[in-house]
Image: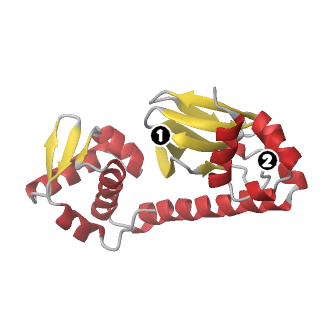
Amino acid sequence: MQSSESLEYFFSTHLTFWDNLSPTEKRYVAAGTSEVFFKKGTTLRTDDRNCLGLMIIKSGFIRVYMLSPEGRDITLFRIKQGDVCILSASCVLNQINFEVSMDAEADTSVYMVRTPVYREISDHNIYVREFGYEVAARRFSEVMWAMQQILFMSFDKRLAIFLLEVIDRQQENTVKMTHEEIAKNTGSAREVVTRMLNYFASEKIVVLSRGSITVINEHKLREIAGDYQEL
């Protein structure tokens, strides 16, 4: 069980509003927080009827995406250790009114501040409210980056950027994903992904294996990606 001292230390290093809370507010937030574990592959869904609260990632990764009625999804952004997910508390921020889904891409632990607790301190503390809007604005920038890729970038560049994001994040050059999984992450079709990966393989950029892609020429992949920088 997480001690109140270690929880407050974690909050003080990850929540910029923490030092602007009164001792009473700090105790209120700590008491209204629980540690939740999501096994790899768990899907979380959030909308006006299912507000998860404010999440701070303690360990692991979560992919945030939108799902179409036809079952096609578009990755909006990922949150990693130390990141805050404000969209999971969308019922607190009235300006956020769209539904998102989230997948745990690894075994993931999060601190969950319950919705009534976050709403209460947000309503009465300007620093908390500003923090929420700052995080939402940062995530919105990431959403715009995802839309820019889908709408304006050629698929070879999008795929190169995606592969670089994965290898930069996991610090190894083998991407253990199927073509179908990559298609979901890039907002494309499996056939398009397969065709482009075969092209990358013919150019000696990657080596394809069942269920994995190994990058063997990272320099050339970065040339295709252009001015990509990890978000």
Q: Nearer the viewer, residue 115 or 96?
A: 115
Q: Is residue 2 left or right of residue 215?
A: right
User: Compared to 74, does 134 lie above or below?
Assistant: below
Number of numbered discs on residues: 2
In the image, farthest residue toward the bottom: 227
Find disc 2 in the rendering and name its residue: 92
Mark 1 packing: few (<14 Cα in 10 Å), some, or many (20+)? many
Numbered circle sitting on residue 135: none
Q: What element carries label 2?
A: loop
Q: Residue at image x 53%, y 46%?
A: 65
Q: What element carries label 1?
A: loop
Q: Residue at image x 61%, y 30%?
A: 36
Q: Which of 198 and 6 is in front in this view?
A: 6
Q: What residue type is labelled 2?
A: Val
Q: In this view, does 90 lie to the left or right of 142?
A: right
Task: Report the Cα–Cα distance between label 1 and label 2.
Answer: 25 Å
Q: Position of residue 132 (x, y in %)?
A: 73, 57
Q: Is residue 54 left or right of residue 209?
A: right
Mark 2 packing: few (<14 Cα in 10 Å), some, or many (20+)? many
Q: Nearer the viewer, residue 74 or 173?
A: 173
Q: Residue at image x 57%, y 43%?
A: 57
Let me know if residue 70 appears in the view: no
Q: Position of residue 82 (x, y in %)?
A: 55, 49
Location of residue 117 (image quadrant): top right
Q: Position of residue 209 (x, y in %)?
A: 15, 38
Numbered circle sitting on residue 60: 1
Looking at the image, is mark 1 or mark 2 earlier in the sequence? 1
Q: In which quarter of the image is the N terminus?
A: top right
Q: What residue type is labelled 1?
A: Gly
Q: Position of residue 172 (x, y in %)?
A: 25, 48
* Number of the front mark, 1 or 2: 1
Let me know if residue 191 appears in the view: yes
